[in-house]
C-alpha cells in the first residue's frame, strides 16, 4: 500500500487522465471513510457574486447548484466536468458566520497572495439554507496544518483515528490513516491549475458512489483552515435543505479588513417557494463604514 500511495502521489495530474486517477482510487487504493452528521436545524450558506445591480436573482434555483450541467466544463474541488455539486459553508468555532467562509472561497481578492493586497468593492447574494433533515457526510479532518491550527478539527481527527485503530488491526489502521491524510491534503489543497482538483474530485466521486453519503465536508484553505466547507449532492439539496432566506450584501475590502453591509432581504420564504422579491434594508452609513476601517469596531446593531 505504501508503494501504491507513493506512486499515486508522484502522478502528474495534468498529464494523467481523470479516468485513470479514478481507476487507481477505486481499484488499487482502499478508500477509507469517516462519517459525520450536519444536524437538522443548522445552516449552510452559499454565496453568489453579482456582476452589478442589474444582476438581481429572483429564483431559488439561481442560488442553488448549477442546474445546466453542460455549463460545468472544468473540475471543482469535489466535482468533475458535467457533474453538479452544491458548494457552501457551515459555522465553525473560529468563524461563526458561514457567509464569511463562502465569500473567501468565492472572491479572488480574499485568497492566497491576493489577501490584503487588493482593495475592492462588490455585491453578493447570500442564500441561507436550513438543514431540515440530517445530512450524512464524509468528514476530511486529517490535514496536518488544519489539525494544528483548529481545535475542533484536532478533536474530530483524534476521534476518527481512535475509532479506526479500535476497529482494525494496527497495520491496516495505519494504512487507513495515511490514506485519509493524503486525501484530506488533496481536499484542502491550494490549487494552481484546474487539474489540481482531479484527485479530490475523484475521491469525492468514489465516496458518493457508495450511496450512503449526502456529500463531503472539509476545511477551507482560503480561511487558513479555520472555516468549514461542504459539497453536497443535488439530491441532498432537494431532500434535506430549505432556502429560508436570501440577502443582498455589499462587500468593501480594504487591506485585510472586510465590511459586509446588508442592503436587501427576501424575508422568510415558504418551504417550496421558487420565486421571491426583495425588501430594502437599513444599511450602515458611510460614516459607520469609515469608522470600522479606521478602528476595526463594528457599528452597533440598529434597534
Image (spheres, rainbow, N blue to C red):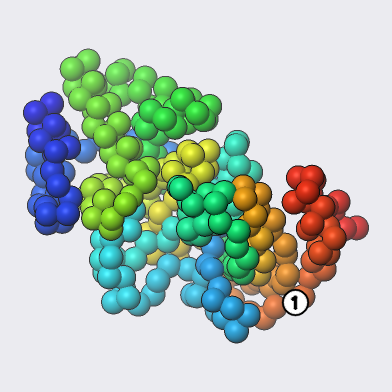
Q: Is residue 24 above or below residue 286?
A: above
Q: Is residue 7 above or below residue 75?
A: above
Residue ranking furthest to the front: 117
Foreground of the two, 256 or 91: 256
Q: Quadrant of the C terminus?
A: bottom right
Q: Is residue 138 above or below residue 239?
A: above
Q: Along the horizontal axis of the image, is 138 left or right of 50?
A: left
Q: Quadrant of the N terminus?
A: top left
Foreground of the two, 224 or 242: 224
* Residue depicted at x 58% and y 45%: 91
Q: Which residue is mark 1?
A: 279
Indicate the position of residue 282 as horizontal and vertical percent values.
82, 68
Q: Along the horizontal axis of the image, is 295 left or right of 192?
A: right
* Residue depicted at x 37% and y 61%: 85
Foreground of the two, 99 or 138: 99
* Residue depicted at x 39% and y 39%: 139
Foreground of the two, 6 or 63: 6
Residue ranking furthest to the right: 303
| One can see residue 40 in this view | no
Q: Is residue 146 above or below residue 162?
A: below
Indicate the position of residue 198 as horizontal and vertical percent values.
23, 53
* Residue depicted at x 23% and y 21%: 174
Amino acid at each position: 500500500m505504501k508503494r501504491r500511495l507513493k506512486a499515486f502521489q508522484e502522478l502528474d495530474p495534468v498529464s494523467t487522465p481523470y479516468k485513470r486517477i479514478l481507476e487507481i482510487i477505486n481499484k488499487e487504493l482502499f478508500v477509507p471513510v469517516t462519517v459525520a452528521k450536519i444536524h437538522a436545524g443548522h445552516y449552510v450558506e452559499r454565496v453568489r457574486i453579482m456582476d452589478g445591480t442589474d444582476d438581481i436573482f429572483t429564483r431559488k434555483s439561481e442560488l442553488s447548484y448549477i442546474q445546466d450541467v453542460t455549463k460545468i466544463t472544468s473540475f471543482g474541488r469535489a466535482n468533475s466536468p458535467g457533474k453538479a455539486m452544491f458548494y457552501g459553508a457551515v459555522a465553525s468555532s473560529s468563524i461563526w458566520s458561514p457567509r464569511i467562509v463562502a465569500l473567501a472561497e468565492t472572491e479572488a481578492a480574499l485568497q492566497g497572495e491576493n489577501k490584503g493586497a487588493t482593495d475592492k468593492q462588490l455585491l453578493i447574494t447570500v442564500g441561507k439554507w436550513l438543514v431540515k433533515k440530517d445530512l450524512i457526510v464524509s468528514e476530511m479532518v486529517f490535514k496536518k496544518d488544519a489539525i494544528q491550527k483548529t481545535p475542533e478539527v484536532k478533536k474530530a481527527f483524534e476521534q476518527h483515528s481512535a475509532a479506526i485503530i479500535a476497529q482494525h488491526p494496527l497495520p491496516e489502521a495505519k494504512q487507513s490513516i495515511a490514506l485519509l491524510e493524503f486525501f484530506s491534503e488533496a481536499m484542502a489543497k491550494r490549487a494552481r491549475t484546474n487539474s489540481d482538483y482531479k484527485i479530490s474530485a475523484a475521491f469525492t466521486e468514489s465516496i458518493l458512489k457508495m450511496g450512503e453519503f449526502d456529500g463531503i465536508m472539509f476545511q477551507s484553505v482560503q480561511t487558513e483552515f479555520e472555516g468549514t466547507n461542504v459539497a453536497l449532492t443535488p439530491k441532498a439539496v432537494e431532500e434535506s435543505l430549505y432556502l429560508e432566506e436570501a440577502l443582498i450584501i455589499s462587500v468593501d475590502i480594504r487591506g485585510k479588513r472586510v465590511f459586509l453591509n446588508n442592503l436587501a432581504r427576501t424575508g422568510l420564504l415558504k418551504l417550496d417557494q421558487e420565486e421571491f422579491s426583495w425588501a430594502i434594508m437599513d444599511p450602515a452609513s458611510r460614516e459607520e463604514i469609515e469608522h470600522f476601517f479606521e478602528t476595526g469596531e463594528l457599528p452597533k446593531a440598529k434597534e
